[in-house]
Amino acid sequence: MGNITKAGPNVIKAHLRHLQEHGQEHFLNEAIDFLKENNIEVPEYEEEPLAGGCPGSITRDLRASGNQTHEPVTLTSELGNWPIQLQLLNPNAPYLNNADLLLAADCAPFAYANFHQRFLKDKVLIIFCPKLDKTMEEYVDKLSEIFQKKDIKSISIVHMEVPCCSGIEVIVQRALEKAQKNIIIKDYTISINGEII
């Protein structure tokens, strides 16, 4: 929530509305508590529903953006662990010992063309979707267990620019608090057009 407040009242309002629209009452209450504790005005987020619903669900045709190339490129995968989906991950997996973690939104590797070389190299990948997955509390518990047991060296987060994707940072922060760990997080946001913003 700290990063969201830096973006100003309109982004705060959109984030609160988004949490409400998706039934994320726990996260909504946490966000409101954060605002109150930090003497930040809680905006009227229940009014004026967004036209078309969730901004992350707006239909867009990106083919005209000029991001496509027709020349084949040979790249090497940097994926070093399996499984990668947080729901399937074993918190006792040996590759988590002293790992540099990369927590990515499911969509991010598809939107950012150079994901492997820019973000994944020498990291342990964990993916999930804070909007569609229905196991957020379990994710907090599982990440907390990893943080407690595995002496994680670093955490990087890669998520999309849509508001629901910022839920990844919320989940990671809650897991760190539960594990009573203080690990610096590097947070990267990817635009719908595939750029780091």
Image (cartoon, rainbow, N blue to C red):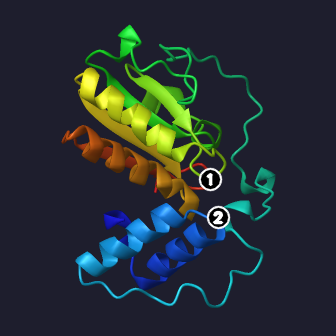
Residue 111 visible: yes
Q: Quadrant of residue 47?
A: bottom right
Position of 69 compared to 26: left or right?
right
Q: Quadrant of residue 96?
A: top left
Viewer-proximal residue among 67 and 11: 11
Residue identified by numbered label 2: 22
Task: Write the residue at 74% across / 28% down.
Answer: 71
Task: Write the residue at 34% across / 88% down.
Answer: 41
Residue 33 lies, in percent from the top left, at 34, 73
User: Which tag, 2 or 1, sits closer to the chain's start?
Assistant: 2
Viewer-proximal residue among 80 and 119: 80
Q: Amino acid at mark 1?
A: Lys
User: Looking at the picture, does residue 129 appear above or below residue 83?
Assistant: below
Q: In which quadrant of the rendered image does the N terminus lie?
A: bottom left
Residue 152 visible: no
3D distance between C-alphas at marks 2 and 1: 8 Å
Q: Quadrant of residue 30?
A: bottom left
Residue 102 lies, in percent from the top left, at 41, 32
Residue identified by numbered label 1: 131
**Which structural element holds mark 2?**
loop
